[in-house]
């Protein structure tokens, strides 16, 4: 990096999960299609992802999202998501943050009581309906890309945790999902460190032992997030999860099994969870699904329109939640700074 960058952002959170909406860096991202742009980010822009999400500008649970020009006629903009573990094609919470930020700051004109926003992603174009009142976005409903199950209840050997059953499901990105009881834990804030350790170990096991890819975008071929949930549905039981995001340095060394909990119920994770439940016969088309985070915040979802993604049977998830703008910021990345790409220390990372 030989030049100074001045980065403009709108800071937001969706049901607790921080999303840094990057509004003036589209020129960094090259490519005529969203797939080309995603691949370019993966190959060339890790330094920018590190700079924006690591200290001193970021913190372990922070995500970011590029606002990009659309590639399809009729779309309002494109997004590519920056997570601690890498770039991601789609994220529900970051979509909620980006739509809320774009409407409340005039990037996309707000129409009350409802505004439809169309967004290009690397796994397809999505439609978003934002309910608006008095210049504010009340909530955001996302008609996501089709979700599908690759494996249901497939056993895998996880170092230190033994053989456990895992669902591998795509909900906008790939998720490894399992009942948290399979690693001897319960969902609670007190168990946060133990949950992140188990989630990181499962992610490492799946990404090193299984081979899979998205049929329409083969470069999406690894698990980004592990979701530890509270098991099968039952009457009167609130579905809850702890979604584990990790850094990008997970190895066979148990000392690297660190991560952070998604503060929200996880939007793409909720999509994947619904798809997995549908595959298990525990969620019907059109049935509302309430999904609670570790913090107690909720997303709501449903499934419709069975379809195919490659050879996989798929369903179309819709997820709904709210986001809030918390501020705006101007960040500087200076090549003379001794830490232009930021840093991480083991006390909190």
Image (cartoon, helix red, strand yellow):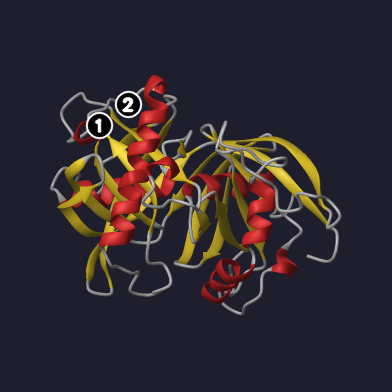
Q: Position of residue 235 (x, y in %)?
A: 16, 27
Secondary structure of the residue carrying numbered label 2? loop
User: Compared with residue 103, is residue 197 higher up or lower down, i.e. above or below?
Assistant: above
Report whether residue 76 is seen. yes
Left or right: residue 239 versus residue 2 is: left
Label 1's element? loop
Of the numbered discs 1 and 2, the one sitting upstream in the chain is 2
Residue 242, image x and y in percent? 37, 34
Q: Which mark is residue 230?
A: 1
Disc 2 target residue: 187
Q: Position of residue 291 (x, y in %)?
A: 34, 34
Query: What is the crowding at mark 1: few (fewer than 14 residues within 10 Å), some, or many (at least 20)?
Result: many
Residue 111 in view in this figure: no
- Residue drawn where x is 19% and y is 52% of the image: 156
Res 299 quadrant in image? top left
Of residue 307 and residue 327, the one placed in the foreground of this image is 327
Q: CA distance from mark 1 to mark 2?
A: 7 Å
* Image-based side of 210 in relation to 235, left or right: right
Mark 1 and 2 residues: CB-CB less than 8 Å, in contact?
A: yes
């Amino acid at each position: 990096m030989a030049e100074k960058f001045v980065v403009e952002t709108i800071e937001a959170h969706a049901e607790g999960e921080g999303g840094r909406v990057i509004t003036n860096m589209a020129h960094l991202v090259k490519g005529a299609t969203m797939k080309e742009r995603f691949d370019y980010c993966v190959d060339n822009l890790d330094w920018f992802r590190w700079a924006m999400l690591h200290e001193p500008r970021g913190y372990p649970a922070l995500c970011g999202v590029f606002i990009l020009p659309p590639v399809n006629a009729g779309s309002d903009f494109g997004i590519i998501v920056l997570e601690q573990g890498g770039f991601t094609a789609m994220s529900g919470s970051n979509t909620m943050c980006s739509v809320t930020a774009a409407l409340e700051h005039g990037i996309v004109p707000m129409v009350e009581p409802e505004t439809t926003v169309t967004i290009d992603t690397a796994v397809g174009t999505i439609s978003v309906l934002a309910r608006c009142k008095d210049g504010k976005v009340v909530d955001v409903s996302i008609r996501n890309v089709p979700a599908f199950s690759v494996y249901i209840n497939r056993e895998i050997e996880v170092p230190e945790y033994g053989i456990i059953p895992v669902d591998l499901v795509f909900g906008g990105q790939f998720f490894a999902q399992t009942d948290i009881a399979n690693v001897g834990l319960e969902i609670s804030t007190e168990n946060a460190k133990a949950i992140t350790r188990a989630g990181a170990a499962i992610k490492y096991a799946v990404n090193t032992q299984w081979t899979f890819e998205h049929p329409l975008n083969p470069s999406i071929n690894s698990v980004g997030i592990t979701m530890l949930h509270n098991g099968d549905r039952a009457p009167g039981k609130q579905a809850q999860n702890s979604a584990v995001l990790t850094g990008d340095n997970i190895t066979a060394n148990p000392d690297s099994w660190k991560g952070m909990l998604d503060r929200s119920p996880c939007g793409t994770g909720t999509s994947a969870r619904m798809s997995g439940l549908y595959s298990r016969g525990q969620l019907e088309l059109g049935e509302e699904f309430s999904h609670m985070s570790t913090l107690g915040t909720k997303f709501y979802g449903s499934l419709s329109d069975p379809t195919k993604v490659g050879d996989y049977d798929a369903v179309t998830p819709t997820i709904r939640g709210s986001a809030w703008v918390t501020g705006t910021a101007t960040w500087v990345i200076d090549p003379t700074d001794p830490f232009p790409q930021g840093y991480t220390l083991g006390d909190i990372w």
